[in-house]
Amino acid sequence: MRRTMLLMGLMSGVLAAGTGVCRAVEASAAANALAPASIFEAKDFPDPEPGKPAWKGDAWYSGICVFDKWVYAVSPAGYVLQFERDPVTAKMEYRGATPFGFSPDGDSGVNNAFTRKASDGGTLLYFEFGNHQPHNLAWYSLDKKTGKPAFKGKQAPVAGHTWWCYHYVPVTDRIYGMVGRGDKQPLASRHFDASGATVEDGRVATLGRSNFGWLVASSDGRNVYQVNGKTVDAYTFDAKTGAMTYLASVEAGSGNDYISPVSPDGRHVYLFGGYKSGGPLTVLARDPEKGTLSVVTSGAADPKFNGLPSVEWNRHCRFVFRADGKSGAFTAGTGLFGCAGMVGTFTRDPATGALTVGATAAAIPLGAAHVVVDPITGQLFTVGEKIASFKR
């Protein structure tokens, strides 16, 4: 059975001819160092078209997605780069770049990538393109043998302007996001039709709050959570109708605006960061039956994680879990908006939700903002100013 790894970062397709140069990096002698297996940057790729570079690295607006043995890095330059990874060493070989297949509208920016099963039994790869303009959702079919993507369609906007806030949930095969940019916007769920495009199910009001935060859905598809300043609002989701209903709210953190994915066992959610500066890490417990949240620890109460030097847990941090929920990976910032980042691993206590940092690669100038982890092998892949892979 083929494995599908999504998100938090981005997705993509691939193809164009060309051979890139990969610089393998020697393992660090430091016991707590996370050593990359491969690092690529813009100069390592030949131009797919005369005068048009394949990679325009951006710590904010580029993304990465893993499916089967393929790694896809999406560039605001308008290409999807394809790599083949070694299942043991995590080293990557460049396999080419393919154009988006459309002319992007508005500001450039890539966010949110995921793969899903197509109506014909194949695999579709999606990514969101846009920044301060209405977002487009583009999707590609992946060749079963080569992994090569073929452009299938583009939809704009996706539930209005989603402001990087939509979330795909495999169990319901739906995305959830904000409808329109800015404050006091409703949330909506959307399902997919046979062509791969999305269709809105319905909307729910967001209590008149300033909802400029992020949202996630639980892996069981029963709840949607959105952080709004110091408040996290919970909604229930009806899998038959697609309707969302307000459930409850909890006061947490100190103005955080990023919420992590719900842990795979459905028991914990994490808040961190401010818009431009770092904030404390807050651990929330989730009742798997009711879907409600409660605060476990906040700020300095989790020194093992918050104690990293010069780290700002801001909105450009990313958390991803392995399949068992007992470990995962993160990226974290060290400057304005957190784009001069570090990548690292963590372990999680399933009982308390406490996170403890393991190995880090803080000294490597990756500019990493997005990270994905293979849920089985634990291999890490990051994208930002550079593209890198790590063996756990």
Image: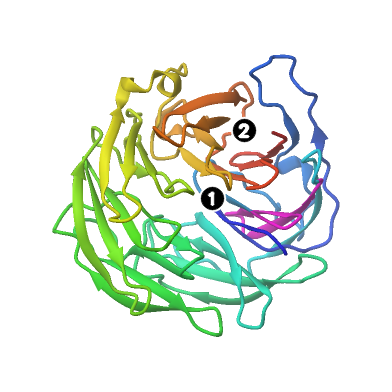
Q: In this image, 372 relative to 160: left or right?
A: right
In the image, which residues are magenta? 66-86
Q: Position of residue 301 (x, y in %)?
A: 32, 21
Q: Is residue 14 above or below residue 312?
A: below
Task: Identify the residue at horizontal 69%, vertical 75% (top origin).
Answer: 122
* Mark 2 residue type: Leu
Labels 1 and 2: the sequence-earlier one: 1
The answer to whether residue 11 of the structure is visible from this angle is yes
* Mark 1 residue type: Gly
Q: Position of residue 209 (x, y in %)?
A: 16, 53
Q: Position of residue 45 (x, y in %)?
A: 77, 47
The N terminus, quarter of image = bottom right
* Residue 366 - label: 2
Q: How many marks?
A: 2
Q: Main secondary structure of the magenta part?
A: strand
Q: In this image, 98 relative to 209: left or right?
A: right
Q: Nearer the viewer, residue 310 or 260?
A: 260
Q: Quadrant of residue 118?
A: bottom right
